[in-house]
Image: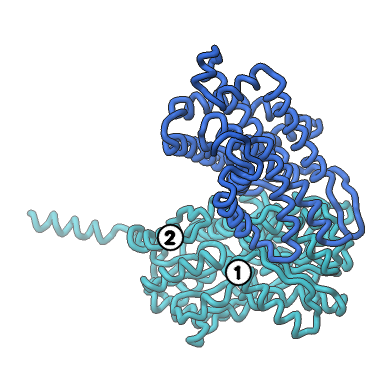
Chain colours: A blue, B cyan
Amino acid sequence: MSGVMASLIDGLLLGAVYGLAAMGLSLIWGVMDVINLTHGATIALGMFALYLLCGSFTVSPYLLLLPILAGGFLLGVIIYWIAVHRVVGQSQLMSLLSTFAVNMVIIGLGTTVWGTSPYNINFSVPGFSLGRYTFTGNHLLAGLAAVLIAGALHLVLYRTRMGKAIRAVADNRDAAELMGVPSARILMAAFGIGIALAGASGGLVATLFPFTILSGGAYELKSFVVTVLAGLGNPFGALLAGILLGLLEGAVTPFIAVSWIPAIEFGLFVLALVLFPRGLFSTTRSA
Amino acid sequence: MRRAILAIALVLFLSVPVFSQTVTIGFTISQTGKLNVDSLEQFRGFELWRDQVNAAGGIRVGDKSYKIEFKNYDDESNGQHVQQLYTRMILNDKAEFLLSPYSSGLTATAAIVSEQYGKIMITTGAAEDKTYKLGDRYLFQMFTPASDYLTSALDALKAKDAKARLAFVYSDDSFSNAVATAGKAYAQKIGLNVVFDEAYSPETMDFSPLIDKVIAAKATALVGGGHYADGATLARQLYTQKAGLKFIALLVAPDSPKFVELGEAAYGVAVPSQWEPQTTFKPQLGPTGAEFAKAYEAKYKAPPSYESAGGYAAGLVLQHALEQAGSVDTAKVAAALNATDTVTFYGQVKFATAPGEHGLQIGHTMMLAQWQKDKSGQLVKQVVWPIAGKTANLIYPIH
C-alpha cells in the first residue's frame, strides 16, 4: 500500500470530524446570522467533558457522547440567553464581540481549572493494518461517529417539527413568526444544537489526540475554512467540505512539508471566497 | 540633656544586630501556555534552592548574610511578555540578578533585556548556542549547548546499528531546529544514513501524516521532538500507528516524570538528558545527586527532572559566584562566574570566556536515558549512554 493511500485514509477519517465540528458553526451562522466565536472553546469543553466522564464511568467513550450532546445543548441554551439573544438581528460586530467575550471567559476558567498541560484519554480500539501502515480503531470510530451524528442532525432538521421550524426561521424569520413559530425559542434550540455538535466533535477529537483548553482554537479555524467551502449556513455541505478538506490534507502531505498545510488551507479559503462566494455546496440561500 | 539622649539613641541604634540583607533575583515562569510542564519543573529547582539556602541562613557574601528573595511572574510561554516582564523586574522590582525563563526562544528575548541593563542572567533550560554568540557579557549557560544535544543518542545508535535508516522529525522552534541541524551534521559525520528530515509546527496535535511519511521512507530510527506537549503526542502516535521503529530518541518530553502516563507508548523511548538522578558526580559544592533528589521528592512528591536539576544548579552556581566575589557588585560576580570551574551534583560547570561565545557552557556533558521496565514491569528511566555511566544496557530494537 502506498503512503499516499494511507495518508488519504487518515485524511478521510479526520475530515469527517472536521465536518462535524464545522456543522455546529454552520448551523448557527445559517439560522441566526451569528458568527459564533465560542465555537473553539466549546469544542475544548467537549474534550474535557469526555475526559471527566471517562474517569467517572466505565462505559465506551462513544456512548458518553450522548450526555455530552445533551450537556452541550444545555450549555448552548445558557450561552444563547446570556450572550446571543439580545444581539441577534443586530450588526455582526455585536455578536462577534459578545461570543468572543464568552469564549474568553470559558478559556480563562478552563485555564484556571485544568491549566494548559495536555490531557490524554487512555483508550484505544484495535485498528487494522494494510502493509506497513496501521489505522487505529479510534480514528475509524471517530469518523463513523461523526457521520452518524451528522445523520441524526439530518433527521432532526428534516423529520421533526422543530427541525421544520428551524429551517423556516432560517429562511425568513418574519414569515415564520407570522405562521406562529416562536422564533426566539427556535433560535435558542438551534444555538443549543450547534454547541452540542461542537462539544461532540471535541469529544471525538479527545479520543484521538492529547488536548488542552486551548486545543479548540485549531478546530475553530478549520471550521471557518470548512464553512466557507461549504457555503454559509449549510450544515450538510459542511460535513462534505470537512471530508474534502481532510482528503486534501491527506493528498498533499506526502509531497510537501506538513507545516505548509495551514498556508494551503487558508489559500483555499481565500480562493473559495473569490471564486465560489456561496460555497462549493451552496443551497439557494444567499451568502 | 538632649545630647545625652541622642548619644544613648545612637549607641542603642549601633548595638542592634546587623540583619541579613536581601538579594533579589528575578525570572519568569511559564505557568500557562505550551511550556508550562518543563517550566514548572525548572521553577521547582529554583524554589528548592532558595528555601534550602534561606533556611541555612542565606548566602554568605563577605561579612554579610543575604537572604534570597524571588520576584517572578507568569510569562504565559509568550516572548512578548518576557520582554515586558524582565524590564519590569529590573526597573520596578529592582532585581539584582536574573535567572532565565524556560526555553531557548524565551531566553533569547530575556537576554536582550538583561544585557541592555547590564544584569547577570544565569540561563537554564536554554540550550541553543546562538544566543551566546552575540557578544553578551553577562549571560551564563547551565545546559549543554544544543549543538551537542544529540551526540550521545547518535553515538549510541551508531554503536548498535551502523546501518540504521534515520528520520529527523522535530518541532519548528529555535531550540529544536538548532539541535536537529547540529544532529544531522553529526549523523552524517559518523556515517549514519538520514532518510527523512522534516520539521513540524510546535502547535501540531496530529502526527499521523508525518508518521505515514516516516513509514514510507522506511526509517528504522527516529530522532527529534521538541518540548513536552508535542513530544508526548508524537510518542503516543508512533506507538498506536505501529511505526515499527527500532530506536526512538525524543528531546525533552521523555525526561519529564509525566511521560510515564503514556504507558506502553513510553517503553523504549530514549531522551538526551542533561542530568539523571542516578548519576554519581562527586560535588565540590552543594548536595549530592541523591540528597537533591530526596529533598525534591519530599517537597514536591515527584521525582526531579533535568529541568529541575538545572534550575537548582543555576541557583547553586550563582550562590558560589556571590560567595567567591564577596560582593553583590555585578562586575565582580561576573568575574567570579567567568572563573567558575566546579562540579556540582549536576556535573561540571565551566563557562566559555572568549568574546565570540562568552557564557556558553563548556564543562557539562549530555547522557542518554531510556524508558525501560524493571523486574516488576514498572516503567523506569535508565541511563544507557555513555557506557561508563550507564545503569542499564540500551534496549535495541525496541519493537
| Discs 1/2, front | 1
Residue B234 screen position, x and y as percent: 74, 57
Which percent across, then down, holds residue B46?
Answer: 54, 60
Q: Could one spot residue A109 in this view of the protein? A: no
**Mark 1 to mark 2: distance in Å?**
34 Å
Query: Which labelled disc corresponds to residue B175?
Result: 1
**Residue nearer the viewer, A122 or B142:** A122
Q: Which mark, by number, is residue B282?
A: none
Q: Quick check: can you spot residue B136?
A: yes
- State whether residue B203 is above or below residue A158: below
Name the amino acid type tagged 2: Lys
Q: Is residue A37 left or right of residue B8?
A: right
Rendering quarter of residue B39: bottom right
Q: Which residue of the protein is positioned furthest toward the bottom in this rendering?
A: B354
The amino acid type, in three-letter code, at marker 1 is Phe
Q: Determine the residue positioned at 75% across, 51% down.
A: A11
Q: Is residue B268 left or right of residue A278?
A: right
Q: For the point 85% across and 78% down, which residue is it?
A: B159
Q: Position of residue A251 (x, y in %)?
A: 75, 58
Q: Quadrant of the C terminus of chain B?
A: bottom right
For the residue carrying disc 1, how many other residues have a C-alpha within 10 Å: few (<14), some (14-19), or many (20+)? many
Where disc 1 sits, the SS reads helix
Q: Which residue is mark 2?
A: B67
Identify the element where label 2 is drawn: strand
Q: Is residue B256 above or below residue B111?
A: above
Between discs 1 and 2, the one toward the N terminus: 2
